[in-house]
Structures are given as structure tokens and as C-alpha cells.
Image (cartoon, coloured by chain):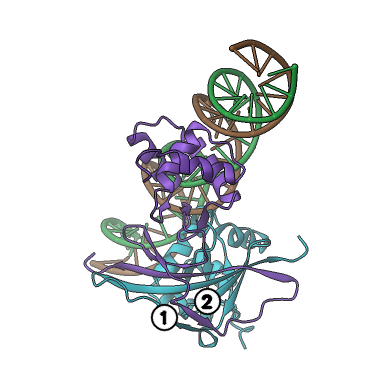
Chain colours: A purple, B cyan, C brown, D green
Amino acid sequence: MEKIRPYSNVIRTLTGAGLRPTRQRLALSRLLFDGKNRHVTAEGLHTEASLSGQKISLATVYNALNTLKSAGLLQEIIVNSGCSYFDTNITEHHHIFNEDNNELTDINLEDVQLKGLPSINSCEKLERIDVIVRVKNKNT
Amino acid sequence: MEKIRPYSNVIRTLTGAGLRPTRQRLALSRLLFDGKNRHVTAEGLHTEASLSGQKISLATVYNALNTLKSAGLLQEIIVNSGCSYFDTNITEHHHIFNEDNNELTDINLEDVQLKGLPSINSCEKLERIDVIVRVKNKNT
DNA sequence: AACAATTTTTTTAATGATTCTAAAAAAATA
DNA sequence: TATTTTTTTAGAATCATTAAAAAAATTGTT
């Protein structure tokens, strides 16, 4: 059902978040919010957009990702110093990270039970809890 | 008891790990392995060394940290893209990270119970599991 | 539809963390 | 001691990211 009006959904998503549906934001959002959860880097999304025929500068991709994050449409995941990943799954959840091919996979929050964490300092507030299961390829 | 021969311990630590006890490695190791667990960045350790009167180039600090890590004397902790932290506590454990003052605190492994993690792919092997409790200051 | 006001995009340059390189210095080996 | 190997160094190079300034697009208002 999304075949007929491929843009209408992302337009709603953007305007709903108070963002102008510009050409480049629409193009990127179409790549990002295509139904399945995605984990992208700025560089990766940029080449993807380029390959799909869209001419968008890398700086704009950075801007867009940060804007979408601020608008609550993306989550930033930190798994390796060096580059940021953005996750279209904005619900609280955890990750498996393959350090060989830099691939991120979601772990359902409900599946995991985390107990015994220390109470945090009274002058601090909890932001979030990240669980990262780091794996490598066996053969390598 | 470490007052009398302040270098003997770190020399043993380095040679025991198969590393030559060079002047700069000794100086850095004295700062790192002074009894309590530490979390340092290359930049931070470099200024610390400079302040203590040692002339060590930043590149050497990077080299030394990576070498110590490879030798199993340090652990790299990834909490924010942008810069790496090195932890002198090489036992398996978790962290609290204050995103306002970039401060890392250890969480004892035994205190935490983590259950229900998905079984990893058969072609992959578990490297380690990181739990990062992200906090911010209340007032800010 | 046209207009001005505001936002976004773009290009280019700057930044910060880290690595690389090639030469000099130090340490180990013969 | 002479020679080989390893480390250190300073500076250049690189990578991801942000900043600044100008150009272009979008919006609400006539």
C-alpha cells in the first residue's frame, strides 16, 4: 500500500515532528524509514543516497541525521570510537555489535533482564542503559 | 611499601608482559598503575605526564596505550565516539558514564545479573558484553 | 502568484582525535 | 664495541565531524 504514494508517509513523519519536508530530508527519510529497523552511519547513508541517484552533500546528511535525532526520530548508538551509528528503532533496546564487519543488530528489551545495577549518585539522573554484546567472526 | 622503590613494581609489570621498560613507558605506567583503578584518555594522560615533569610526546602516549592494551594491561572502553578511554581495571566489569563531565566509574561485575541475552550466530564468537549506565547531572 | 522572512543546503574550511612516516635515539644482541 | 632491533619523536596525513558563509528552497502572508 505504500507503493502508490511513496512519499506521503515520510512527509507525515517529518511534519509530524515539526520538520520541513525538504527534498533531501525526504530522500534520506525514505531510505531510513522504509519499514524495517535500520542502523546507518552518515557516510553509509550518504553513499546509499548517492547510489539511488540523489545528489545530497555529506554535510547535509550529517545535519539531517542530527536533526532527526533531536526530533526524536532517530537514536544515536555508540559502539566504536571513530564513527556514530543512527538507529531508526527509537524504543529502548540493546545491541549486538560485530566488530569484524561493523554490523549492529537489535536485542529486544523485554528479552533481557538486568538486575543489581548500583543506585546512581543523588546529583545525577539516569539517561539510559546500553547493553552491547560484542562479537567477532569465528573464522577470521 | 612502594615508596622506597617506586619503579620496581612497574618494571616488573612491563617486563612481565613482554614489554621493554623504557623511560616513557615507565613514567606512564607509574601514573596508570598506582594502586587504584584509573580511566584515562590519551590526551589526559599526556597532560598528566607533562605536569609531572616528564617530556613524552602525544604520539608516544598513543603508542604506549595501544601497546599496553595489546599486552593485556589495559582495556579500551568505548563510551563516546570522539575519543577512547583506557581502563586499568582489566577484569570483566561494567561502567557508569557521566555524559556531562565525561567521567567513568566501574560497576562490579558480580553485582549485576544479566539474563536473557540472545544466543549469538554460530559463525560468531562472543568477545565481551558492555553495560553502560549513562547519567547526566541533575542541575544542568 | 509574488514576496519577504526564515530555514535549509551547499561548499569550503576548520577542528579534534588518531595514525603514519621517516629519522633519530635507545636498548638488546652478537 | 659494533650491529641489529625496537622505540620515540615531530610533523604530516587521515578520518569523522562541525562551523561559517553564501546560495537556494520553503513557508506564511498578501
Write down the residue under mark 1. Answer: B116
Report x, y in % for residue B114. 47, 82
**Mark 2, residues whose alpha carbon is within 10 Å: few (<14), some, or many (≥20)?**
many
Q: Residue at x 48, y 39 (%)?
A: A61
Secondary-structure class at tag 1: loop
On the image, which quarter does residue A108 sit in? bottom left
| Front residue of A100 and B1 | A100
Q: Quadrant of the C terminus of chain B?
A: bottom right
Report x, y in % for residue D24. 54, 20
Tell me: residue B127, above or below residue C24: below
Q: Is residue B26 left or right of residue D3?
A: right
Tell me: residue A93, above or below residue B81: below
Q: Residue at x 55, y 40 (%)?
A: A63
| Front residue of A57 and A38 | A38
Report x, y in % for residue B5. 58, 82
Q: Amino acid at mark 1?
A: Gly
Task: Name the chain letter of the residue that bears numbered label 2.
Answer: B
Write down the residue under mark 2. Answer: B94
Q: Is residue C10 left or right of residue B49?
A: left
Q: Residue at x 46, y 32 (%)?
A: A57
Task: Name the chain letter of the residue that bears numbered label 1.
Answer: B
**Mark 1, residues whose alpha carbon is within 10 Å: few (<14), some, or many (≥20)?**
few
